[in-house]
Every structure is written in C-alpha cells, then in structure tokens.
C-alpha cells in the first residue's frame, strides 16, 4: 500500500463530504487544506439517517462510537392515512437481521461537529474559511485552486465536495441544467416535549396523502422530533437549501389533513422552518479529470426521498482514501475511486428519483397493505466501503 506522505490534498467544501474526505485522506498520509466558502462551519440541517454502510465508513474514520452515544435508534415507521391515521403499511425502519453497525439517526449539526473536532485534533491548520472557489488549473504535477478573495492554494490533488451547485463540477464538466421535480420540501426540528401527545406513542412515522408526504422521527436520544414534509406545487422554485418558511405556508399545503399533522406544524419553531424546491440531475458519466475529482453531492446530487445522501458521501470518502493509498500515481488512484463508486451512486440516485415519483402519485385510498421495499435493501445495507474491491 502506498501512503501519500508529503502529498497535499485541496478539498473544496466543508460539509459532510468534505470533512469526511479530509479525515480519510489524513489517514493515508496526505496533508489536507479544507477550503470552505463560508466564514464558519455551517450547522444547518436537521435529522439524517446513517445506515450500516455509512456507519462502517464512520468506524473507519474513528467516529462511530462517539456518534452512537449521540444518535437514536430508528423506531418503527408505519405509513398512515393522512386523514384517518389508519396504518397502511407496518414498516420497520431497522432491517430485521443482524448488522455489525446498525442504523441510527443523528442531527446533522452533531455529525458536523464530531468530524470538525476530529479534524481539529489531527490537523489544526487544515481549515481555510472564506474561500469561494472561482477556478483551478492543473499540470502533470500539481493543481492550483483560485478563490474569490484573490488567494490561491497549491496541492497535488483537488476534490470538489462543494454540493449540488458545485463550482468544481461546473469548471470540469460545464454548468448543468437541473430539472424542477414539481415538489417542494420543508424541514424543522420540534422539541419532543411539545408534541409527544401528537405522535400516538410511536414517534416515527409517515403520513401519505394525495401529492403530499409528511415524515417524522426522533433524534438526540428522543429530545427532538425531526419533521420533513413534501408537497407537489409550482408555487415556488427556489433551489436554496435554507429559505425560511412559515407555519401558515406549510399548513396551507396540508389543509384537510388530520389534526395531529396540523398540530405538529403548529409547534414548528417560528425560526427554523426551512423550505427548498427539489431539482433533479442525471448521474455524471465521468467524475475525474487529471488530478481533480468530485465527491458527495458534487458528484451525484440526489433527491432526499431515501435519506441516503449523507451516507453515500461517507462511503465515497473511505473508498477515495483507499484507492489513493493503493497507487503512487494520483490520476490512477482517482480513476480507481471513480470506477468503484460511480455505478453504485448512480443506482441510489435513480432509486431516490423513483421513490419521489412513488410519493408524488401515492393514492392513500388504495395504498399497498404489505410492504414493498422502495430500494434494494442489500444495495444499501450490505455494502462495505472499507472492504469493497477497488
């Protein structure tokens, strides 16, 4: 195994993908420069699901045990009728078979903090804030990133982890034209003490109505209820991840629904109710050029309907580190990384698209009475980024 001591990695974007990539590359010997456009780490977001494959990646990075103490084990997740609360499908969130690193749900801010703290201990000088990428140049031997503040950083490799509107991706492959799905999502976190009486003894669950879905589950050991709603509407198409919304706007989308759902919306915080329009992008056929590549949403921006975006980015990071440690030539290592990850991430991206379509046309009056998995469970649960062939 080749260890990349003396090599420098430029990582653009300090979200889940960028932080986990930094930790993975440090593990195989790189010096890391993590360049973030904001002036501080962003802890926006709400609950995220970490399935066994993601938790294997976290264990490789040395973070799993810490997060296990913070996270919540997923409850059962019945699918219910939007007006009557009749259970349409009795679905278990946890796959009923042994797992070495079972699924958990955490607050995104907690995951970001755990990763950032680990990075601070291992590489105190790694972070560079206020660095908005405007372009990069590469030669056979190095890559130089240029930022809006006039600064530059030079390294041996550049990994674009800068999200769905990736500047790195745009330079490498041109600006894309995402398609609006006709759906808008809302998210919020509600203190459980306010709404315990509204969740009928089962804090996890999904309500299905015509063109609407409302999902809830606990995080932070049950102290918070993570709530996410999806609605088909053309009333707004902003792609920003953190546009403020109001209870009144969200209640209007769910008019006529059961009082428990409307009661949850009434308890949403006046600050912290966020909306974003859902845009779809096709899988990229190529991720890498020379010494530059992409990771996470920059490579495979997927819709949120399966809750797998964070986990797939964690998988990417481990495979990237392993692939680069297996060769002494960076472009060859990036090709191995891409070859190992591209098909899997594309399958999950497309499965997330299909799940969104299923939700969009759901008919609660004729909903399935037995569970039909929305994605190949083995595709998600059994994958091991630490041992998969590269």
Image (cartoon, helix red, strand yellow):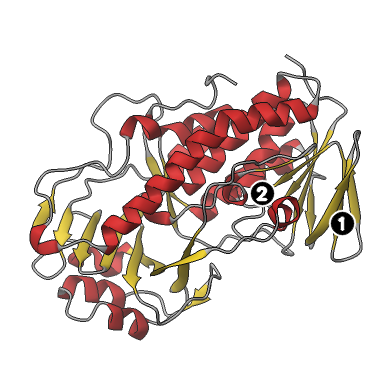
Residue 277: image location, x then y, percent: 46, 70
Q: Callout 2: few (<14), some (14-19), or many (20+) C-alpha neighbours within 10 Å?
A: many
Label 2, on which residue? 161
Q: Is residue 109 left or right of residue 351?
A: right
Asked which secondary structure carries label 2, the reply is loop
Residue 292: image location, x then y, percent: 76, 41
Q: Residue furthest top?
A: 1
The numbered disc on residue 206 is: none
Q: Is residue 48 above or below residue 139?
A: below
Q: Is residue 259 left or right of residue 194?
A: left
In the rendered image, the quadrant that contains the C terminus is top right
Image quadrant assignment for residue 29: top right
Image quadrant assignment for residue 103: top left
Identify the residue at horizontal 20%, vertical 69% (top origin).
210
Identify the residue at horizontal 16%, vertical 63% (top origin).
363
Q: Nearer the viewer, residue 73 or 223?
A: 73
Q: Is residue 212 above or below residue 116?
A: below
Identify the residue at horizontal 73%, vertical 32% (top origin).
26
**Residue 63 seen in the figure:** no
Q: Nearer the viewer, residue 12 or 73?
A: 12
Identify the residue at horizontal 88%, vertical 28% (top origin).
6
Residue 121: image location, x then y, percent: 72, 39
**Residue 224 seen in the figure:** yes
Dot 1 or dot 2: first in sequence order is 1
Residue 343: image location, x then y, percent: 51, 34
Asked which secondary structure carries label 1, the reply is strand
Tags 1 and 2 touching, CB below 8 Å? no
The numbered disc on residue 146 is: 1
Mark 1 to mark 2: distance in Å? 16 Å
Image quadrant assignment for residue 117: top right
Q: Callout 1: few (<14), some (14-19), or many (20+) C-alpha neighbours within 10 Å?
A: some
């Amino acid at each position: 195994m080749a260890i990349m001591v003396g090599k420098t990695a430029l990582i653009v974007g300090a979200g889940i993908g960028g932080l986990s990539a930094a930790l993975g590359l440090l593990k195989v010997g790189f010096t890391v420069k993590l360049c973030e456009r904001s002036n501080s780490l962003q802890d926006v977001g709400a609950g995220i699901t970490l399935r066994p494959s993601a938790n294997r990646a976290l264990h490789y990075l040395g973070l799993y045990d810490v997060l296990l103490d913070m996270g919540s084990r997923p409850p059962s997740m019945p699918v219910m009728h939007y007006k009557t609360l009749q259970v349409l499908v009795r679905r278990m969130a946890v796959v009923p078979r042994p797992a070495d690193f079972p699924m958990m749900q955490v607050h995104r801010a907690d995951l970001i903090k755990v990763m950032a703290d680990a990075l601070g201990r291992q590489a105190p000088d790694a972070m560079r804030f206020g660095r908005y990428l405007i372009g990069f140049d590469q030669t056979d031997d190095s890559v130089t990133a240029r930022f809006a503040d006039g600064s530059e950083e030079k390294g041996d490799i550049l990994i674009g982890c800068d999200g769905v509107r990736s500047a790195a991706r745009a330079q490498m492959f041109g600006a894309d034209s995402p398609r609006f799905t006709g759906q808008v999502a809302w998210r919020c976190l509600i203190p459980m003490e306010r709404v315990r009486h509204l969740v009928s003894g089962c804090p996890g669950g999904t309500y299905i109505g015509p063109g609407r879905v409302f999902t809830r589950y606990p995080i932070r050991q049950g102290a918070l209820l993570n709530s996410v709603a999806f609605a088909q509407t053309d009333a707004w198409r902003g792609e920003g991840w953190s546009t403020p919304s109001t209870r009144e706007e969200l209640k209007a989308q769910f008019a006529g629904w059961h009082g428990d759902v409307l009661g949850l919306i009434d308890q949403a915080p006046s600050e912290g109710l966020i909306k974003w329009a859902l845009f779809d992008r096709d899988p990229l056929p190529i991720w890498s050029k020379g010494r530059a590549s992409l990771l996470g949403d920059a490579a495979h921006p997927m819709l949120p309907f399966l809750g797998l975006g964070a986990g797939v980015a964690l998988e990417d990071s481990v495979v990237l580190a392993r692939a680069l440690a297996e060769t002494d030539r960076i472009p060859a290592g990036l090709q191995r990384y891409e070859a190992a990850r591209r098909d899997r991430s594309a399958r999950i991206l497309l499965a997330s698209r299909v799940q969104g379509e299923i939700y969009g046309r759901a008919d609660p009056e004729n909903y399935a009475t037995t569970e039909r998995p929305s994605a190949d469970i083995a595709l998600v649960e059994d994958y091991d980024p630490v041992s998969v062939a590269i």
